[in-house]
Image: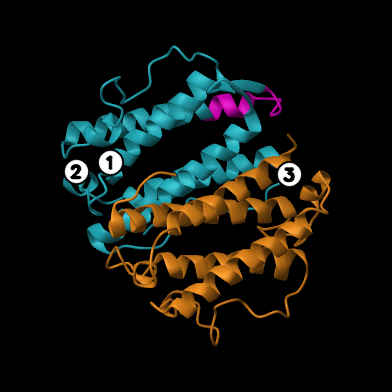
Chain colours: A orange, B cyan
Amino acid sequence: MTELETMRRWLADFRTAVERKTADLDAEQLARRAVPPSTLSLLGLVRHLAQLEHHWFRRVLQQHPEETQLFVVDGDWESQFDGAVADPAVVEEAFATWRETCAQADSWLDGLPTEALDVVIGPGDRIESIRDVFIQVLQEYARHLGHMDLLRESIDGRTGV
Amino acid sequence: MSEDPRDYRATHGERDTVLTYLRNYRLTFEMKCAGLDAEQLAARSVPPSTMSLLGLVRHLAKVEHSWNRRVLQEDLDLPRLYWAEDQEDLDFDGAVADEAVVADAWESWRREVAAADAWLAAEEDWGRQVPVHGEPTEVRDIAVHLVEEYARHCGHADLLRECIDGRTGQ
C-alpha cells in the first residue's frame, strides 16, 4: 500500500468510527454535554469535524479560502459547539454537512497521485505539504474520537472502537 | 506552565513527519498528566469509564512495548506488559493510587518509549511487512497507528484531566 493509500484508509476508518459513535441516539443525547464541565457534545464534534474537513481539504488544499468556515458564526469558534442544540433539524444539518464535506474531499483526493503528498502548499509554515495537512486531519479525528469515546460511554454506556 | 517542549518546525518527508508527530504526542500526553498526585492520576474521573490517567500511562507503555518489541521485532511470544490471560484490562484495573505504582508506570513508559524510538529511527524500509493478527502489515501503517493511538488517548486524557482539576488545552 502506498503512503497515500495508507492515510486514506485511516481517514475512512475514522469517519466510520464517528458514524458508529453517534449511531442510535436521539437529538437530546447527541447534544448532551455528557462530561461536565466540558462543553463538548457528540453533535458539536460532528459540526467541528465538518469544519475541519472543509477547512483543510477545501479551503486550503483546493485553494478556496473565500468560502466561509462551516458552523463558525461571526468568527466565534465556540459557535461550533454552542450552536449544537437538541433540535432534530440541527442534527440533520450537521450530519448532512459533514457527510457532504467528506464526499467532496474524497472526490478531490481520488485525483491525487501518491507523490503529491510532498507538494508544498505553505512554504516555511509548520503545515507545509499535503502530507502535513493529512496527518493534521488524521490526528485531529483521532483525538476527537477519544472525546467521543468518553461522551458516548457517559450517555448510554456504549464502548468500543 | 513552563515553555512548550513540543517541536513545531516544518517537517520533511514521511518519516520525519510521522516521527515528529509521535514525539509531540508523547509530550502532549506527559503534559496532560503533569502536576497531579497519585490519587488524581488514579482517579476514574469520567464514570462509568474505568479509565484514569495512570491507567493510560500503563496502557501506553503496553502499546509501545507491544508494537515495538512484539510486532516490529517479530517476537510475538514475548508477554505483554500489564496484561494477564485472565486480566486483559490489568493496565487500567491495576492503576491504583499508590506512589510506587505511579513510579513504576512512568519508568515502564519511558523505557519503552526510548526503546521504540531507537528501533523506529533505525527502520530503513517503512514498506517492510510484519504480521499483525496474521495479516502482513507495513511498518508505515504501524507508525501512523502509533500517532493515532496517542491522539485518541490524548482525547481521553483531555476529558479526564478537565474533570480532575478543570485544566484544558495543549
Q: Quadrant of residue A147?
A: bottom left
Which is closer to the viewer, label 3 or label 2?
3
Residue ID for mark 2:
B38
Provide the secondary structure element on which disc 1 rests. helix
User: Which amino acid type is marked by label 2?
Assistant: Ala
In this rendering, position of residue B12 left or right of residue B78: right
Q: Are marks 1 and 3 in contact (CB under 8 Å)?
A: no
In the image, B76: left or right of A6? left
- Of the 4 image quadrants, the one containing the N terminus of chain B is bottom left
Q: Which residue position is annotated with label 3?
A: A4
* Residue A83: % across, % down: 44, 80
Chain at tag 2: B
Does the magenta portion include A138? no
Tag 3 and tag 2 share a subunit: no
- Mark nearer the N terminus (1 vs 2): 2
Query: In the rendered structure, which amino acid carries the disc numbered 1?
Result: Leu
Q: Residue at point 59% right, 44% down?
A: B20
- The tag on residue B54 is 1
- Could you tell me residue A88's position as x and y percent? 44, 77
Q: Which residues are magenta?
A: B117-128
Q: Residue at x 60, y 56 (%)?
A: A137
Mark 3, other Cα within 10 Å: few <14 / some 14–19 / many ≥20: some
Identity, as a three-letter code, of the amino acid under mark 3: Leu
The residues tagged by marks 1 and 2 sit, at their Cα atoms, a distance apart of 8 Å
State the image quarter where residue A29 is shown.
bottom left
